[in-house]
Amino acid sequence: MGHALIVDDDADAATMLAALVADERFSVATAHSLAEARRQIAMHPPDIVLLDLKLPDGSGMELFDDPQLTQRSEIVLVTGHASLESSIQALRLGAADYLIKPITLKHLRGVLSRVTPPAKLRAEVDDMTAELAATGHFGGLWGRSGVMRRVYQQISRVAGTGVTVLITGESGTGKEVVAQTVHDLSRRRKRPFLAVNCGAISPNLIESEIFGHEKGSFTGADRQHQGFFERAHGGTLFLDEITEMPMELQVKLLRVLETGTYLRVGSTTTQEADVRVIAASNRPPQQAVEAGKLREDLLYRLNVFPIELPPLAQRAEDIPLLAEHFLQQVSEREGEHKRFAPAAITKLVAYRWPGNVRELRNVVQRAYVMAEGAVIDDDWLPSNGPGNGPPVFRSAAPADSHTGRPPVEEALAAEPGAPTHAHAPPADALVLPMGTTLAEAERRLILATLRHHQHHKERTAAALGVSLKTLYNRLKEYAADPAADGEGAPPQA
């Protein structure tokens, strides 16, 4: 039987909560001040502390200064809306979760069912860290580079809490794998992990898919439908490409995060959401806010604990390890073992990988199929030569030996009609003037890459390292934007 300590200056509220906890087969003690709480902790160390932050002799935050408590006991905040920001701060200090007053029995049972000693969680992280040193992988993530070790540290820190996480990074960097690893190390691991790509669901159906609907709520709703929040109850809901979620639905998501409740489409009955939300975006969140694709208040609510994933080009030292891992996977699946020639590994490391880890996995699978023998050489591997990739940014170029200015500046300074071919940038380069906004740079790169691939959208999406749905969404935006005309205008359907 577990032991719970309830710390609340409201004696009636503490007594009522103690009765509910006792019904869940916990022994219970109560304290109405910090001093009394410390005495109770010394006499009988609790497995879980239900802590109110506002106490007559100080803030409940002071209990986090006791290392013996934080190592031995799971701390859950009991808070009202007014102190929600304080709860987020406490979560960052190591609180496992929080309950919003008035406390519902369903939420309380969920928290009590997940009670896990912090020491056990730390032991699991230690085991994964040892596995990293031995084999090079941390959960489902592979790599020993410094930037990835920083990501592992962040995952280890946040997994055992109830904090909302926002993962950012280019498409193909492994955001869903990070979310899955956070879930697997959390107290919710025995409950579902559901991943939702907000850009892959029709805008007309996304509210029903996320929140569910009642029978007869709209044409074709011939039965009640459970949404993702309901199916992920007690577990983790991963919302990928959150910036593709319609703005009106972002308002409802914000309400769920703030109140823990939602309504099915066509219903007037409030449903309780005991779900941890992890969101992800392949574009910088602040840029999405400025472009009107993400509500600023929702960003602040999601971005409690940000994790930024580096592109593969920034961790080239991990490429051999990742390539060998993917080769091992495909070899086991196909039943024939193959290996890389040294020249193949050299070429893989030299490539710039616009599609990141996802592209590397696809390249390894293709090379395996094309290799005639047991050794994979570099014949079927990509290179950075002309025509092998999308246009690249050229922010600077070697200066002209006579003028000292970059060739592009020479071309701009030349008189109208003067020949500039000697200093023109390569045909596959995209030259942008200083001061170009990120949104405009993204627009020009996407459209230039589309032209480079002769309007073949699948190849364009692969070269840019984004999903086909994301590419279509961007092209739809540009077609509706009067500013996207002239040479940069997207092709008409």
Image (cartoon, helix red, strand yellow):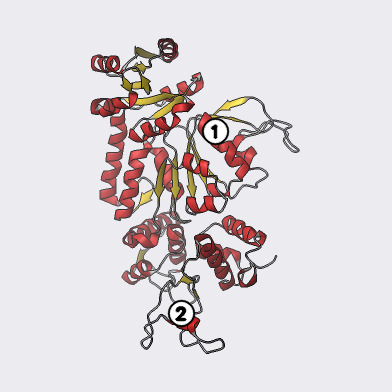
Quadrant (top left, top right, bottom left, bottom right) of the N terminus: top left
Q: Is residue 309 above or below residue 38?
A: below
Residue at horizontal 53%, vertical 29%? Answer: 259
**Residue at mark 2:** 408
Residue at horizontal 37%, vertical 80%? Answer: 398
Residue 323's disc number: none
Horizontal placement of 65 versus 488: left or right? Answer: left
Q: Residue furthest right?
A: 219
Q: x and y percent of residue 402 in the render? A: 37, 88
Callout 2 secondary element? helix
| Tag nearer the camera, 1 or 2 | 2
Location of residue 19 by image quarter: top left
Nearer to the camera, 391 or 11: 11
Q: Is residue 237 above or below residue 370?
A: above
Query: Identity of the amino acid at label 1?
Result: Val
Q: Is residue 333 above or below residue 118?
A: below
Query: Identity of the amino acid at label 2?
Result: Val
Q: Is residue 47 visible?
A: no
Q: How many marks?
A: 2
Q: x and y percent of residue 430 in the render? A: 50, 73
Q: Is residue 72 visible?
A: yes
Nearer to the camera, 421 or 194: 421
Residue at horizontal 36%, vertical 31%? Answer: 90
Horizontal placement of 345 versus 217: left or right? Answer: left
Horizontal placement of 224 versus 53: left or right? Answer: right
Label 2 Cα neighbours within 10 Å, binned few <14 / some 14-19 / many ≥20 = many
Q: CA distance from mark 1 to mark 2?
A: 52 Å
Residue 256's disc number: 1
Q: x and y percent of residue 284 in the render? A: 47, 53
Callout 1 secondary element? helix
Q: x and y percent of residue 216 in the render? A: 74, 32
Label 1 Cα neighbours within 10 Å, binned few <14 / some 14-19 / many ≥20 = some
